[in-house]
Image: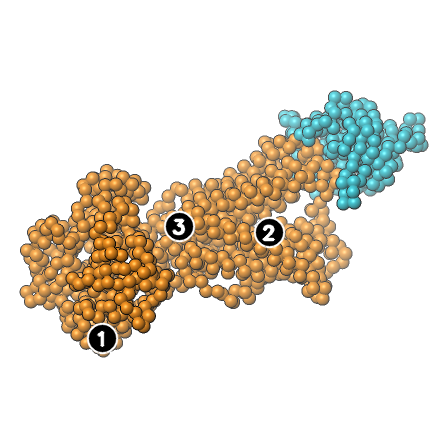
């Protein structure tokens, strides 16, 4: 489903070039859920951006859905791929403040020109338990509610892959747990491949596999108890 | 498209677009209002001032012009009329007097009115056309001169005609001093009966035309080549120098105001659009992660742009139309003329201004949105490729220049203002940055609120400098407009002071000089010193006979010609309102020297040191040009193209001229004066002065109105630039409040910050305004520049008070909210 080979990301800083990621090779299968874990500043969010086509690597290739080598694409082409097969959930929710919950969820379908955008959005908001909040603006919703809207929006385009960046980072433990339940539930229903970045060990533990990034490098197959547990 | 509409509507509802929309509406509204009002006023003024020449266009010639000229006018739907002027002796039973006879047809006058009375120096009333065949009308002063009463007859040539009316005012008499003899008006049909006009007689044919401006232009282009070489064609501006100058300056001022309005509106739009774009960075990043391509982003924001542009422009044009209609309604009782209906083009101009402003100022930041990196959803510090500075500045600069040029139709005025503004922006930007940096000294020593304020300014030193620049520019333009307006109004007020001489006495015989002065002084009438006047003409220029100098056909037709017989004088001191441009005024030991008016010198290719030979009273007089001077033709004083040094005319039998101020209740004195000294001629210009003061009053009103509108645009810029910096300020103050800073401290430091910004901006504005006013008054308005030292104090104070007031007003609501709400709304 997702394949990265020799992915390296360097940026130029005032103190010379800085290597953020170096020689990352990985493969993520269809329907698999993978947690990218590591210390702050290890490069895991950068890796997520690259895999999702939000950024381009300095070298290496990334292929999504066996068809799209996004590292060879222009920004416009990558945007089309994102629209077609990728969904996002962010730590800071990233809802458009000027649109209602319903309008936010309608966005991906609208961008694809889908005439049934409103119906799909209403259904999804029902799925995340916000059918009574469709006309509310993000600032009128709590953090947990905003993240549920964001999850509904992520599934609105029926994506093949869902990328989540610290989806519970801004939520308390209780709310976070509910949001995660919802995320995994929908993920299972839609058969989506899930790639998430997290500091939360419990969240990471619910994934099929964990990729440990340290100082920009992918450490080979961390045999963490979480993984054993997940398999067991 | 649906998404674009939803975003647009939503942004409108939430107030995101309010400022951009308001800036646009005001830009379009201001330009439309000004152009509409000026258009109507201009039409009214032209109509009113056309009465100075009794027509819109006049052809003057010493011979009849070909019939094709009047036929062409008729075909184009123009009205036409004809007059014939000549000098002739008028005889009563006892006396004779040289009179300036004007014969008019039944359609005369095409513009303006004849004012007549039923007794000499009596109360006037309006007559719509001239005397019928078989009667004459005479000026008041002719009755005592000829010693007759109204109704008695006068001989003109072979014809004896009864006097039916006393002529008080004819529209095209003007203030010129060529026709100093008293006026008799008769019907054109009676002229053959007088047997005065024979081949070779010195007569002036005037053909008067009036009608639609476009038709007049078409007609003028059509007949230009049919005009005989010695004819002159002129309109109001060339024909009525007394008001032509005031009219041109007023037009230029209104134009300048409109231009400044466009610049101000542009700056406001640019600021508002930038803020709008900036606040949409996150939106675009999210849309991109959701699959929107850069082309899609363009499509969404261009749709918003077009929707906004169309609605704002229409709204602005409507607002402009309503404002000018309202203003015209309110001003109607004050205006002595009724305003004609506005034409359509000002509305078109307003509409295009809106779209061009939007294109030039709002498009670049919106187009730059396509470059926002989608990664911004994760890393907020990422902006993406900056909007191309060259593109943005190129658009803004090009758009402004194009609009200014189109609007003013004057490349010189546009370039001067444009380059001036650019230089000002560069210089002022640098000074603003220096000022911000120097504020550190103050900040370190001052109290807590000061420290906060200065720290805020310094932390955002680049933005602060930009803001000072925007405030400064707006204030500068407003100050400039105010200063030019003040000079202009002063000049108009001084042009004809309250007690300026309103009567001119000519043909005073040398032996009567003292007696006349004593007579007037006894009647408590203030009299100016007298000076000689004699008629003569130039016969040779640098040894070449004037007749040999052929006039170029069609060229310089309205310029003064060297070959004409002119009034000449000799004066020891330079007359008021004359300025030496080249050479020097006569010294104490001046020989046979002459001073030439600059326009006369230019059109006849005369230069310093040239030799001119005159013929005066049949005798030649050789002189050398020792100075070229400018003359204020609009001051209603006797002005001369040619002035000799004092001794030159001593041997010639010249008469003398003087002027005096007569109040309206002293007219009887005039009658007595003329009865006692029948050979002298008195020219009454009091009615003309009144007419000019009326027109100047109207123009003044327009100028003041314009100032108010521009102030409104200026306020919009201030608001836009304050809004632009609001988010960051609010965040900072919300954090401070969260940390326990008192509301008072936050308000005080914010007020101080705005005051410092405003003070600096005021200082820059003063600097810029003084420089711009200097340039404008010298180059464009031909005014004398006087520095305004008080402004250096008032400018910064106005800036500080204005900006802190507007700033505090704009931030009042937010400051009252709990800090968490502020932080949350800022995301």
Q: Position of residue B796 (x, y in %)?
A: 57, 63
Chain letter of mark 2 equals B
Packing grade of label 3 (10 A; few <14, some 14-19, many >=20) is: many
Q: Name the residue tied to disc 1.
A: B517
**Residue in front for this viewpoint, A30 or B642:** B642
Whole-percent x, y for residue B679 in the image: 15, 68
* Residue A198, position as x, y percentages in the image: 83, 36
Q: In the picture, residue B485 is in which quadrant?
A: bottom left
Q: Which color is chain B depicted in?
A: orange
Question: Could you say whether the residue bearing mark 1 is in a helix, strand or loop?
Answer: helix
- As drawn, the label of residue B721 is 2
Which residue corresponds to mark 3? B38
Which circle's residue, 1 or 2, is located before the other in the chain? 1
Same subunit: marks 1 and 2: yes
Label 2 – label 3 distance at C-alpha: 30 Å
Q: Residue at x 77, y 27 (%)?
A: A62
The residue sitting at 51% across, 45% down in the picture is: B400
Image quarter of residue A78: top right
Q: Which chain is cyan in the rendering?
A: A
């Amino acid at each position: 489903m997702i394949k990265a080979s020799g992915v390296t990301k360097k940026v130029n800083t005032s103190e010379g070039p800085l290597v953020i990621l170096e020689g990352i090779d990985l493969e993520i299968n269809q329907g698999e859920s993978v947690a990218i874990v590591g210390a702050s500043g290890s490069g895991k969010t950068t890796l997520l951006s690259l895999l999702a086509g939000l950024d381009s690597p300095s070298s290496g290739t990334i292929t999504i859905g066996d068809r799209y080598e996004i590292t060879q694409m222009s920004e416009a082409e990558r945007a089309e791929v994102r629209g077609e097969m990728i969904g996002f959930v962010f730590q800071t929710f990233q809802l458009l403040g000027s649109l209602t919950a319903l309008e936010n969820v309608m966005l991906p379908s609208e961008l694809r020109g889908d005439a049934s955008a409103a119906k799909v959005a209403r259904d999804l908001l029902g799925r995340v338990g916000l059918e009574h909040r469709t006309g509310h603006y993000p600032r009128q919703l709590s953090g947990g509610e905003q993240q549920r809207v964001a999850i509904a929006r992520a599934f609105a385009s029926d994506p093949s892959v869902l990328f989540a960046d610290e989806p519970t980072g801004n939520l308390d433990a209780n709310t976070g747990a509910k949001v995660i339940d919802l995320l995994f539930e929908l993920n299972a229903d839609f058969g989506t491949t899930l790639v998430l970045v997290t500091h939360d060990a419990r969240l990471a533990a619910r994934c099929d596999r964990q990729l440990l990034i340290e100082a920009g490098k992918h450490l080979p197959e961390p045999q963490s108890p979480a993984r054993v547990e997940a398999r067991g | 498209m649906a998404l674009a509409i939803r975003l647009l509507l939503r942004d409108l509802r939430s107030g995101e677009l309010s400022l951009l929309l308001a800036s646009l509406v005001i830009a379009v509204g201001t330009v439309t209002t000004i152009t509409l009002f000026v258009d109507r006023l201009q039409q009214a003024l032209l109509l009113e001032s056309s009465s100075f020449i009794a027509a819109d266009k006049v052809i003057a010639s010493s011979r009849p012009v070909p019939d094709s000229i009047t036929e062409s006018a008729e075909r184009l739907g123009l009205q036409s009329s004809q007059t014939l002027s000549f000098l002739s002796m008028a005889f009563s039973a006892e006396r004779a007097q040289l009179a300036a006879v004007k014969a008019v047809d039944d359609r005369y006058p095409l513009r303006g009115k004849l004012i007549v009375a039923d007794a000499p120096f009596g109360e006037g009333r309006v007559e719509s056309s001239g005397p019928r065949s078989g009667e004459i009308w005479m000026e008041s002063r002719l009755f005592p001169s000829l010693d007759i009463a109204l109704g008695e007859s006068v001989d003109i040539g072979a014809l004896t005609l009864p006097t039916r009316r006393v002529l008080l005012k004819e529209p095209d008499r003007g203030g010129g001093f060529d026709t100093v003899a008293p006026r008799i008006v008769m019907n054109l049909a009676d002229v053959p009966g007088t047997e005065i006009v024979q081949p070779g007689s010195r007569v002036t044919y005037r053909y008067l035309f009036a009608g639609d401006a476009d038709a007049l232009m078409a007609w003028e282009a059509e007949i230009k080549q049919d005009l005989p070489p010695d004819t002159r064609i002129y309109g109001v501006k060339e024909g009525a120098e007394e008001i032509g100058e005031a009219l041109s300056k007023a037009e230029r001022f209104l134009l300048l105001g409109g231009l400044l309005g466009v610049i101000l509106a542009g700056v406001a739009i640019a600021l508002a659009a930038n803020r709008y774009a900036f606040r949409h960075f996150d939106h675009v990043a999210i849309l991109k992660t959701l699959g929107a391509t850069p082309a899609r982003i363009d499509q969404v924001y261009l749709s918003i742009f077009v929707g906004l542009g169309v609605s704002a422009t229409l709204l602005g044009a409507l607002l402009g139309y309503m404002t000018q209609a309202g203003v015209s309604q309110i001003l109607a009782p004050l205006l002595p003329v009724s305003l004609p209906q506005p034409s359509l083009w000002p509305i078109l101009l307003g509409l295009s201004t809106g779209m061009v402003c939007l294109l030039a100022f709002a498009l670049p930041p919106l187009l730059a949105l396509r470059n926002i990196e989608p990664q911004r959803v994760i890393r907020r510090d990422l902006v993406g490729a900056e909007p191309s500075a060259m593109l943005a500045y190129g658009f803004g600069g090009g758009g402004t220049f194009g609009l200014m040029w189109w609007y003013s139709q004057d490349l010189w005025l546009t370039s001067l203002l444009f380059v001036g503004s650019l230089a000002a922006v560069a210089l002022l930007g640098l000074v603003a940055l220096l000022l911000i940096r120097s504020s550190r000294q103050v900040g370190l020593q001052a109290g807590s609120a000061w420290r906060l304020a200065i720290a805020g300014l310094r932390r955002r030193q680049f933005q602060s400098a930009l803001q000072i620049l925007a405030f400064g520019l707006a204030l500068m333009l407003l100050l400039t407009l105010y200063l030019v307006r003040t000079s202009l109004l002063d000049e108009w007020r001084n042009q004809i002071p309250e007690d300026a001489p309103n009567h001119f006495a000519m043909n005073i015989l040398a032996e009567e000089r003292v007696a006349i002065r004593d007579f007037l002084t006894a009647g408590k009438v203030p009299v100016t010193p007298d000076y000689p006047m004699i008629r003569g003409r130039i016969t040779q220029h640098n040894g070449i006979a004037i007749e040999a100098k052929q006039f170029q056909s069609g060229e310089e037709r309205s310029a003064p010609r060297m070959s004409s017989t002119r009034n000449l004088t000799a004066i020891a001191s330079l007359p008021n309102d004359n300025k030496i441009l080249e050479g020097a005024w006569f010294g104490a030991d001046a020989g046979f020297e002459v001073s030439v008016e600059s326009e006369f010198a230019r059109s006849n290719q005369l230069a310093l040191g040239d030799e001119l030979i005159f013929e005066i009273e049949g005798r030649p007089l050789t002189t050398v040009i020792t100075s070229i001077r400018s003359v204020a033709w609009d001051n209603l004083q006797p002005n001369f193209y040619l002035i000799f040094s004092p001794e030159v005319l001593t041997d010639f039998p010249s008469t003398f001229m003087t002027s005096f101020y007569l109040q309206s209740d002293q007219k009887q004195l005039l009658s007595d004066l003329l009865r006692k000294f029948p050979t002298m001629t008195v020219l009454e210009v009091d009615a003309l002065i009144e007419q000019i003061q009326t027109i100047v009053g109207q123009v003044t009103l327009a100028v003041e109105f314009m100032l108010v509108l521009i102030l409104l645009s200026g306020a919009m810029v201030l608001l836009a630039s304050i809004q632009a910096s609001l988010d960051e300020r609010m965040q900072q103050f919300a954090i401070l409040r969260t940390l326990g800073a008192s509301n008072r401290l936050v308000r005080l430091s914010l007020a101080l910050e705005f005051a410092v910004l405003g003070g600096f901006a005021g200082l820059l504005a003063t600097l810029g305004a003084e420089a711009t006013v200097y340039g404008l008054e010298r180059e464009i308005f031909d005014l004398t520049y006087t520095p305004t030292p008080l402004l250096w104090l008032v400018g910064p104070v106005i800036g500080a008070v204005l900006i802190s007031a507007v700033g505090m007003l704009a931030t009042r609501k937010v400051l009252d909210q709990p800090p968490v709400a502020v932080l949350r709304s800022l995301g």
